[in-house]
Amino acid sequence: MSQKSVPKNQIVQSYVGQITVVGECFCYGCAVDGQQLVYLDVAGPATSVEAVWAKLAQAKECYLLPPDHDAPKITLRTAEGLLKRIQRKIEGIGIHHLLLLHQDLLTPTYAELSMTYLFLADKTQATAKLGSHIQQLVDIAVFPDWYAYLVQQGRLEGLITPLTCYGGVNLWKLSLDKTCWQRLICRGVNQRGLTLPN
Amino acid sequence: MLHIALRFHEKGRYESYSPTDTPRTRKPKISGYQLVKPSYHILKLLVEDQVTDIPRSRIVEYHYVTVAETVRQQGNYFILPVTASQLQQIEAITQTELRPPVYLWREDQWWTLPQLEIYNTGEMTTMRTTIGDLFGNVHEIREHQIEKSGLHIRSTYEPSQGPGFELVRTKPNIRPDGPANLPTTITGNGMVLEWKRGYEDKPPVWWLRDEYRVSKAQSATYRHYATLKATPHARWSKGFAAWYYTGGSQPPQKWLELVGYAPASSATMPPELAQMIEETLAADQAAEREPLIPLYLYDANTGKHEWNYGNPDVWCKLAHPEAHWLFFVANASLIERSLYGYKLNLGEGTVAGEWLTLSLDELTDPAFQRDPQFIRQSLRRAIEQVAETSKKFLPDELGVLTDAECQRRAFEERHQTYLAEVERKRALEVAMKPYHEFQAALRMRQAFVEGLHHLTSCKALPAQSTPSIDDPWS
């Protein structure tokens, strides 16, 4: 899979290594937040990929073996019940494609101090998504013109941080800290970094 | 008395066809025996009235019989008494048989009866072997020279293994019913010396045991353990808890002395002979006399000598009643044959003590006595006991330190050693202080150099630059 052939707003897939639980299956992307697995993209026979999911669902460790023999193996860990499974069969070749995604990525919680994750496939889209999250988080108005400023300041404040990613995927962590974001916006308005639209 | 042994094979229990007095649904069963023909004929000859044939016998080589219980059996043999006249008839039966299983018990051994025997005639004959096939073709012809053998009647009796067991000897019982010149049981000094017949053909044995079952500490035999152990042919039986002597029909003289047995002097013995015997016995006794200090005492106390400020432990007390002195042994060497100890002279109104070394050869005088009750203790304690008994002197007069004083001195010495050690450590610490300070400074300098090297060798971290507002994700 070449990175050039995919459209701009698609998640890039590239071979990372193989995971063997029951049988072999192949990993095309993986992102880890500290010890917690956030995103996993595997393909292979149905039993193999389901075995990977079953093992992770029981909060057991899996090992991702990179093709380079000198490279250390990547340990995949997760807490129980945190991953959402999306699986489909690729017709014609009998291969199952499995995506495991963190629940916080799919259903963010704004009412309490939590976090969510963003795919950075297309920067505009990612900026818009972040703005959407902030809009829902804070109790003050957030205008689309402010989104770039919020990304910039959020990164400086440590509210947006990149995850450890393998393969072509690029994932960021967004801290849903209402107080911090509100203070950041207020400061921006106060220092004229943010201007109210006319 | 002559006996004939006839071999049989036991063939289990047969159903009898003989009519019984009481009506029964089942046929009664009887033991059946299989006999070869000569044995059967001899059996019929000797005890015809006690033998019944079993009519079901279909194997012509053997006869099957039942016998009355009065016929003696041993192993797989019938043992039957036989007279000289019957023996001739038996010979007539066996001399036409090849190795009949019939044996004669005579002169305390088994004999084979006159019988047929295979012998080599000495003539040579040629034996031809033809090797061929089914179609009449001859492949090979071999010829062997073999010696001819023949049969002849051996008319003599030959000694034999027989059935493999011996009949009980018919001689009168030659075993004695009691020991010669001694009573069967002698009791004295808390011990019993008993004469017991052996089982079967075992010789009689003298047993020495305690009169009553007592603990080891109170046991009279254990008190004389060394003497008993030193007796040749004497052993301790754990099962009977007694010593036994297998050396002869008479018990050892020492054992008789232990039980205090005094034989009644026979009037017929001339006095010279009696005196000679006495002298010999006395010489033997002197040779066998128990050493003044037994070996186990040496073993128990070797290598445990400690001077202890002139109050060492002593473990043996020797006394010479005529010379009025006591000797407390503190150390001994069997190699040098010497004793080292404290000699206590008990004079009239005076008492004196000195440390000296005695040679074991000086103690051969039988007047020397060892106190068997004396146990290992400190010299001071031993002296105190003597002073208490004699009441002639006070233990302090001899200048031997008391146990408490010795302990106090030992403690003081240990304390002094400890203080000296502490002082030595402190002095060493003072002396080494500049060195340790120098070492600490060196370590500090080393740590500083390493830290500096670490800091200077690290790559500079990229400064957190503000992302541009146009491309905040870059």
Image: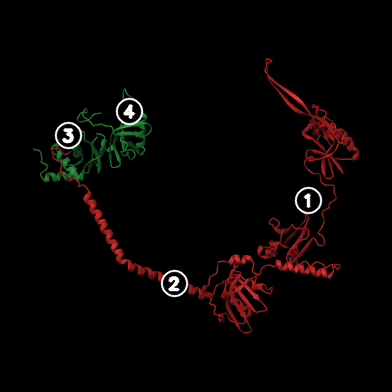
Q: Kindly report which numbered mark, 2 or 4, lies closer to the viewer in this rendering.
A: 2
User: Mark 3 falls within which chain?
Assistant: A
Q: CA distance from mark 4 to mark 3?
A: 31 Å
Labels 2, 3: one chain: no
Residue B415 marker: 2
Taking the spot 55% from the left edge, 80% from the top edge, the residue there is B396
Quick check: can you spot residue B46?
yes
Q: Are marks 1 and 2 on the same chain?
A: yes
The image quarter in which residue B39 lies: top right
Tell me the quarter of the image containing the N terminus of chain B.
Answer: top right
Residue underneath mark 1: B201
Query: The residue tagged with tag 3: helix, strand or loop?
Result: helix
What chain does mark 4 sit on? Answer: A
- Of all chains, the one bearing label 2 is B
Of B292 and B444, the residue lying toward us: B292
Q: Amino acid at mark 4?
A: His
Q: Which label's residue is closer to the chain start, 1 or 2?
A: 1
Mark 4 and 1 residues: CB-CB less than 8 Å, in contact?
no
Amino acid type assigned to the residue bearing label 1 in the image: Asp
